[in-house]
Structure formats: structure tokens, C-alpha cells
Amino acid sequence: MSKGKLRLGVNIDHVATVRNARGGAYPDPVRAARLAEEAGADGITAHLREDRRHISDADIEGLMAALTKPLNFEMAATEEMQRIALRHKPHAVCIVPEKREERTTEGGLEVAREENRLAHFIAPLREAGSRVSIFIAADQRQIEAAHRIGAEVIELHTGAYCDYHAEGKFAERDDELKRLTDMAAFADGLGLEVHAGHGLTYETVQPVAALPQIMELNIGHFLIGEAIFLGLADAIGEMRRLMDEARA
């Protein structure tokens, strides 16, 4: 059975990407976040990368001051990012893998190999009051490790599912959706809250949104792209409509 309304977290990273292309102050990611709130977002996601390629430290300051909805602070498992998160104490932190040369997050975090380090890394974040989420592939070994280290939430990486759809590899897409389905149920059985995200579009969102264990989807790049054509509020509104239709 469904656990209620499926939440939508809107990632505003790529508003900052556009701003940084010219090196000025426009467009403002904080303004985009406030518009997203007004348009029906249940939360805002921002990834402060080590190289600051899009979101900046000042953006995080601005978001913490301006938002009325929860901030999901995406971060690598580094001492610098831990210090920043402990200073701001956002509603949630999502630990993601990060490689400097990648254009976007390419896969889930390898939790099982770094279980001891990550357990110690997230403990102060939990003690500070932030909900800790781990961004991982739909893999039982990684989910079990995330559970053991004390994460409250996992976010399943939907990138492979979306890529297979875009490439017309529908058998592989359906296999990946089956993995997402099975692992969402498995994680829920362990008592973890289940989120999902990465690469979701109007074409791919509904099969994931229909999974009853998933409580939140985090979507960014596609919505910022669609905003060029539709406006941000309408782009978010259409995603919200599709999610609600699928969950109903």
C-alpha cells in the first residue's frame, strides 16, 4: 500500500551552473528555490561539490536563510563538507560519491567497502539533528551496509534505468526497474526510508513514482531544462501531476 503523498525534492544545482557560465550573479539559485517552493516542491536539494562547480558556499548560506521547506544538502564524505554541514545543520544530508572529473554523479556510493569510515563520518551529523541519507545503487549489499552504519534514509540511483530508456534498451530498462522495485521493498523491510532520483524525466518518472515504498523523488537537471521552455513553476507542476497520478 502507498504510504501517502510522494514528496518532490527539486534540485537547483543547475541554476547555479547557468549563473557560473557567465561568472555573474544571475540567475540566482535561491530565487529558483523559493519559486520551486511556491510551485509545490516539498523540499530543495543542493549539492555543494568540492570544486564548487555550481552551488557555492554563499548559496548554502542563502538557502538556509530563505527556505521555508527542508533543505537536502548533498555532500561528499569529506572533513570539509562535514564541517559545513555541522555549521548549518540542514534538515537532511545526503552522502554521495564524488569524482572531480565527472560531469554528474555517475553511480551510487560504495558503502560496503567503507563501512567503518562512513559509520564514524555520519555519527556527528545525526547527533546534530540532520537526517542522514546515503545515495546508492539498487544493490542489496549496499543497502544492508547503509542500514548497519546508521543511515535513516537511502536514495536509490535511478540513472541506469533512465539511461536504458533513453537509449531504447527496453529489456535492460525493465530489468533495472525490477531491481529498483525489489530493493525498495527490501530497504523498507529493514526500516529504512526510501527515496529515489537521478535522470528522471516526464517519460520515466511514473513507474518509479508508483513504487509504494518510495517516499521522495529528487529531480533537478531535467526540471531546470524544461523551465527554459515552460517556466519553472509549470515544469514542476507537470512533474507533480505525473507523480500524483502514478501514486494514485
Image (cartoon, rainbow, N blue to C red):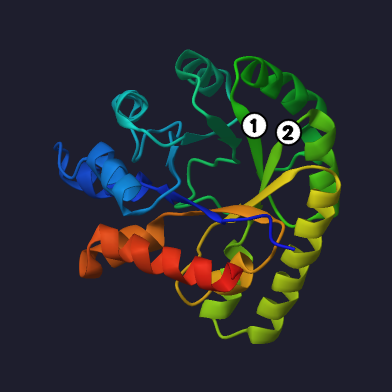
Q: Amino acid at mark 1?
A: Val
Residue type at the position of mark 2 = Ala
What's the mark number on residue 151? 2
Label 1 neighbour load within 10 Å: few <14, some 14-19, many 20+: many
Q: Is residue 130 visible?
A: yes
The kind of secondary structure element at disc 2 is loop
Of residues 81 and 152, the one drawn nearer to the viewer in this rendering: 152
Is tag 1's residue or tag 2's residue first in the polypeptide sequence?
1
Q: Quadrant of residue 153?
A: top right
In the rendered image, residue 222, in percent from the top left (x then y), is placed at 39, 63
Frontmost residue, 153 versus 104: 153
Q: Is residue 16 visible?
A: no
Residue at 68%, 55% (x, y): give it.
Answer: 3
- Residue 233: quarter of image: bottom left
Identify the image quadrant of the N terminus: bottom right
Q: Residue at x 66, y 15 (%)?
A: 127
Q: Position of residue 50 (x, y in %)?
A: 45, 31
Q: Please count the marks in the image.
A: 2
Q: Is residue 182 above or below residue 143?
A: below
Q: Is 118 placed above or below 220 here?
A: above
The x, y position of residue 117, in whole percent, is 75, 24
Residues tagged 1 and 2 counted as in contact (Cβ below 8 A): yes
- Label 1 sits on a secondary structure element that is strand
Residue assigned mark 1: 132
